[in-house]
Amino acid sequence: MTITLAFLALLMAAFAGWLVRQSVGVQPWIADSQTAALPPQQVSLTASPVGLAVFLAVVTSVFGLTISAYVMRMAAAPEWDFLPQPPLLWINGALLVLASLALQTAWSAARQANAQRFAQSLGFGAACTVAFIAGQVLLWRELSGAGYSMARYVGSAFFVLMGALHALHMLGGLYALLRVVLRLQRGVALPQVREAVGLCAIYWHYLLLVWAVLFTVLFVGAEPLYAWCRS
Amino acid sequence: MAIAIALILLLAGSILFHFLSPWQLTPLASNWGSIDDTIGITFWVTGFVFVAVNVFMAWAIVRYRWRADRRAEYEPENKKLEWWLIGVTTVGIAALLAPGLFVWASYVTVPDDAHEVEVVGQQWHWGFRFPGEDGSFGRVDTRLVTGDNPFGMDASDPAGHDDVLVHGSRVRLPVDRPVKALLRSRDVLHNFQVAQFRAKMDLVPGQLSYLWVTPTRTGEFEILCAELCGIGHFAMRGMVEVVEPEVFEQWLAAQPTYASELARAAPDAAAGKALYTPCAACHGAEGQGNVQMNAPRLAGQDAWYLIRQLEYFKAGARGAHPDDTHGQQMRAFAGMLADRAAMADLAAYVETFPEPPPVISIDGNPQRGARVWRNCGACHGSEGQGLQATQAPRLAGQDDWYLERQLENFRRGIRGRHPGDAYGWQMAEMAKLLRDDDATRDLIAHINTLALAAAPAPADPTALARRTD
Amino acid sequence: MAHSIYDAVSTAPPAEGPEMELPPHAHSFIGKYVFCQDAKVIAIQYAITATAIGLVALALSIVMRLQLGFPDSFSLIDPSNYLQAVSMHGMIMVVYLLTALFLGGFGNYLIPLMVGARDMVFPWLNMMSFWIYLLAVLVLVASFFAPGGPTGGGWTLYPPQVVSPGTPGVGGGIILMLVSLGLFIIGFTMGGLNYVVTVLQARTRGMTLMRMPLTVWGIFMATVLALLAFPALFVAALMMLLDHTIGTSFFLPSMLNLGEQSEHSGGSPLLFQHLFWFFGHPEVYIVALPAFGIVSDLIATHARRNIFGYRMMVWAIIAIGALSFVVWAHHMYVSGMNPYFGFLFATTTLIIAVPTAIKVYNWVLTLWRGNIRLTVPMLFAIGFIFTFVNGGLTGLFLGNVTVDVPLSDTYFVVAHFHMVMAVAPIMVIFGAIYHWYPKITGRMFNETAGKIHFWMTFLGTYAIYYPMHYIGFEGVPRRYYAYGETAFISDSVQTLNAFITIAAIVVAVTQILFIFNLVWSWLYGDEADPNPWKATTLEWQTPHNPPQHGNFGPELPVVYRWPYDYSVPGAKDDFIPQNVPPEQVEMLPGYAPAAKS
């Protein structure tokens, strides 16, 4: 719970800080005409990026709580079976890094209106993502084939839980990407999907970060984490 | 206006209710008077705020009621007033919190001279274990739990051999001696609540929790389960008897230790055969039962249940009720069995009887009965096969006239209400589900269908005797 | 003063950029009323669905009360379906009625109108939110028809018992329950993103944060809490589903299932409780904060007085929201968790009482020196304050760890949480429905029926829950089908229980009058004045009544003032709508028509 609380504390602090800037010294009961008379402000952010930011906060809460549960479950267990780290695990990680890089490239290609590079990198990114999800399924089969079944090993169960949640979020991202492609096919110009592609890229980076954390707590960092939980 | 009057009347009514209410904390029987004090403090502080805020509100509603010629006062805020209110509230809250934390510190700190008792919760009864002479509990593991080892004792741990095991839901505690209750569950969550002790705590499977208390007066106090634990939750009842220390020591010494249970000889069916001779007259040579003699079927019943009932008959926990004429008859026979070993031998012999096909004599609506049965099946097994874990006997295949009579006895309090009957209270409460005789017959009709389903298919279907007397 | 204006300017919302594109308004019946992306229609869809399932939960509560009041009388009520009624009543009321009605219903209707937006920012997502909610409700209803019926494990769904064979509904019931919760959370997240982003991004010109009505603040903060807290329930439900279906051991230790050794090992039942209450406690405020916000506006409007201490009210909402994440384990004082947590959580819990008390003071101080119109919404608002003060104060018993010990798991708890998070928010819901009914339907409700509804509900619920505390004092445990022969429970408890049952039936029957009033008035009621309460907020200033698609006609309103300009000295009317510029305020003779700045 500490982990989730830390995240929430950060979020609340940021929120409160922002609010303080908006409200300190404001006397709300004072009416004025100036506010309304001002010319329309430059729109700094449209709704979509704000929506994505809020959504990412929710997703962080989901994964934060899963990790909290994982740590608390570790703390409650007198013994723990650590998962092996087959090569596929590292291949999957590499695929996700590539996907993230490809989407970043697609984003900048969209900004430069470079249609060819955009199509290539978008296609490559999507392919890497699909390969990653398939790789995760294979990894799960490999682990359960090696005896690490969900029912017997809670570490394996957490891998499936977290991995599936992560993969579902990746699938959601692919759906968003598909909508971009469909819009382009309907004849929408490349610069007009710039924002959407950018948001996809940010989402991919974010999910890469999430996977990096999950990868650490589930595999490479599991032993020290367990030692810390039990101390 | 009416609302202001209503508020004042509600306030006055609430205060009157508080002082006149016959429903108050049960008389205290432990050292936790300090908990009652914190409740008292909270009552006075919150009661004052409740009255103050609402009287002010009612006054404001009357004083500032709508008048077309008047304007409300425009006052966006009043920093001074607001900070004063915050300050006063904070002080009030602190005044509530401080004693609470102070008492909690003693609640979680067990005195060094406390003796220990382990409370084991299970669906839907209690068990207790004392550490025995060596003062330490032996190892237990839920995986080791069997019908004969309900505590899950680990026989390989010598520390456990002198542990005193209290089967059944009654326990005794010495007065004026602090006791630390170690709480564990072997299935779901339970909660150990004795209202007069004030203290309570959950029993959680897979871990130990604890509470401590010093009983301060002798008497019998009911243990209620206060954490939802399934269908039988409301009927999960135990009893703490607080007694003088010497009475407690005597009682404790008379309880079996784990070693004595381990040392029990295997039951001898051959010896049981000799003991069965007087039984055969009524129950039949092969325990098939005899309705004319009012003797139920024994064949097919589990030994653990037979032993317990024989013990009850002998001790008067069953059959001693003046309205239980057949039970009184049985008491005389049970008294002929010398000890538990004899009963075990007898039960082992009964277990060798072949199972005759069920005999059906009661008509009812089995569909309606099935609706009630889901409550019964939780303890007796969904097929009525009986579950030792819940201490519920086999019903499928039992003579239906006997089931009807026993259900009637439970409903009327003829059976099950004796303090020596550890699981009877539960059944007596459950039997109240059967609101009338039709409901009983419907239920039995359903149990009969279970019996027919379980019975080995007879070569000749007409062999299923059907009697309608 | 220049400084404050500068601040207000610099934080003006960005909505005056390009007008948001509204999805074209459909003209077919299906497009207009079924698959509709207009937040106002979605709000009504949410409200009707929530009310319908809420009536089921109300009926279940009567089942419980009949058994408790007159035990051994109803042959159809047995321990299994009693527990099922308890569980489903709780779950439906808390999640599917209160959360959905406050956020999906009032949130959808009021946020765009009150902040001066044309609609929610993601209308399609908003529509999906309702349909997934409806699906969740249908799955929930399906669990009633599953073999073995719905779950009887209590609304808290504690493992192991909720998935153990000694509990009703372990067949399909619990699985459908968990699936339904998962769907609800997904659907809610879609709606919640809308509510938050609309408040952040779609406010009209001049609508600074500190000029938002407290209703919007309450719903906004509640949505933030819900977005962050519901994931805990989501994760917990998912893990429980895996435990129950695949046999993982997240929550289940090695244990016995009615004598059978289970395959599980090492799981922690307390882990579930932590996750559940990490959601469950903020959930209390997810229901309470919108109620706080709405009731503030009701009181200000009908007392013709500015809300007292607006800034403190906003900060109290935020403080309560933030603190609500660090008090969850006060539901677990006697759960067997490390008892030393009791010190921490008792302290945080009692701290949260301070901002809550401030809100109460400010409501009462708004009445003070007001000019109070005892309309039906105002009666409900006063009823709310009375009930909430009562329920809030009993919270000080249960939040204070020591005092909680003898009272936890007794009827005191039942009485407390019904007062504070059932009756109090429902009072606000009723008040709010009466308040905005003329806006939503364009018709006036029948006031006499409204007053009868208020009196029966207010006095009836108090008669139910006030005496119930005392049953708890006596130590009577909750979730008991029957008390049987228990020495310490006096016989008079039975008499009191019968009285409570009768009061509950009266209150339940009264709600038929309420629903009849709503339906009848919608069909035959008098046409309502566009601003019958003479309120200042933007939803009352729409060109059409009820507001049409796009809410505000061709021009979005511009906001010049906060929403509480009631009885401004010198102004001719006792209210000045938010969109009236200072120079257009009609003044009484002798007052300068100048802006106050």
Image (cartoon, rainbow, N blue to C red):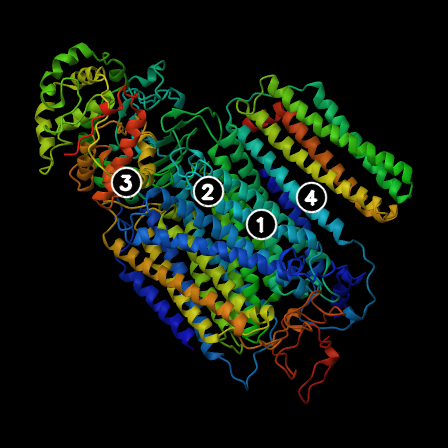
The type of residue carrying mark 3 is Asn
Between the C-alphas of marks 1 and 3, the distance is 41 Å
Left or right: residue B204 versus residue C314 is left
**Callout 2: few (<14), some (14-19), or many (20+) C-alpha neighbours within 10 Å?**
many
Task: Give the number of the mark in front: 3 or 2.
Answer: 3
Residue B333 shows in the view = yes
Residue for point 54% across, 59% down: C48
Amino acid type for the residue under numbered disc 2:
Gly
User: Real-space Cα distance between discs 3 and 4?
Assistant: 59 Å
**Chain label for disc 1:** C
Q: Chain of mark 2?
A: C
Is the residue at mark 3 from the same chain as the one at mark 4? Answer: no
* Dot label at residue B365: 3
Chain under callout 4: A
Name the residue tied to disc 1.
C133
Could you say whether the residue bearing mark 4 is in a helix, strand or loop? helix
Question: Pointer 2: what residue?
Answer: C342
Task: Report which residue position mark 4 lands on.
Answer: A56
Front: mark 4 or 2: 4
Residue at mark 1 shares a chain with residue at mark 3: no
Three-letter residue code for mark 4: Leu
Q: Tell me what residue is drawn at x 78 percent, y 31 percent.
A: A127
- Going 20% across and 23% down the picture, which residue do you hit? B306
Query: Can you say which quadrant of the picture contains the N terminus of chain A?
Result: top right
Give the alpha-carbon distance from disc 4 to disc 1, as whole Å.
Answer: 22 Å
